[in-house]
Amino acid sequence: MESREDIISKLAGRKNVKKIAVENFLISLHGLNKDEAIANLEYDAKLYKWNSDTVKAIRDGIKLLVR
């Protein structure tokens, strides 16, 4: 099984993603459930105008990292 850090690194390394956004968002998930994390993602994506590749990488990370 991949470590949390390895998962985040792979997602942040995807083409056309904002690496810092993916890393920082996924690192900050501690204590959130999936619904809270998705709500935060939707808010931040609009606020920071993240592209669809960045949003997809973060959403995929939430699915893998949040239980």
Image (tube, helix red, strand yellow):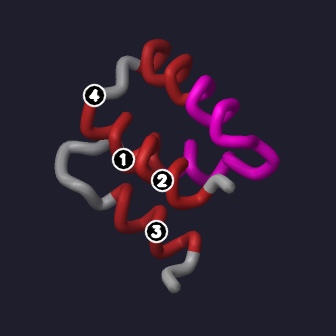
Looking at the image, which residue is at 42% across and 50% down?
A: 60
Cα distance between the residues tagged 2 and 1: 6 Å
Spot occupied by residue 16 in the image (x, y as percentages of width and height): 19, 44
- Name the residue carrying label 1: 57
- Name the residue carrying label 4: 51
| Three-letter amino acid code at the position of disc 1 | Ala
- Name the residue carrying label 2: 61
Label 4 with label 3: CB-CB less than 8 Å: no
Direction left: furthest residue: 15
Q: Which residues are magenta?
A: 23-40
Label 1 with label 4: CB-CB less than 8 Å: no
Label 2 with label 1: CB-CB less than 8 Å: yes
For discs 4 and 2, the disc positioned in front in the rendered view:
2
Cα distance between the residues tagged 4 and 3: 20 Å
Which numbered disc flags the more N-terminal residue, 3 or 2?
Answer: 3
Q: How many marks?
A: 4
Label 3 with label 2: CB-CB less than 8 Å: yes
Say whether residue 56 is left or right of residue 45: left
Which numbered disc flags the more N-terminal residue, 3 or 1?
Answer: 3
* Label 1 environment density (alpha carbons within 10 Å; few <14, some 14–19, many ≥20): many
Spot occupied by residue 21 in the image (x, y as percentages of width and height): 46, 41
Name the quarter where the C terminus is drawn: bottom right
Which numbered disc flags the more N-terminal residue, 1 or 4?
Answer: 4
Q: Secondary structure at mark 2?
A: helix
Cα distance between the residues tagged 4 and 2: 16 Å
Q: Secondary structure at mark 3?
A: helix
Dominant secondary-structure state across the stretch colored magenta: helix
Say whether residue 13 is left or right of residue 58: left
For discs 1 and 4, the disc positioned in front in the rendered view:
1
- Name the residue carrying label 3: 7
Question: Is 6 located above or below residue 23 in the figure?
Answer: below
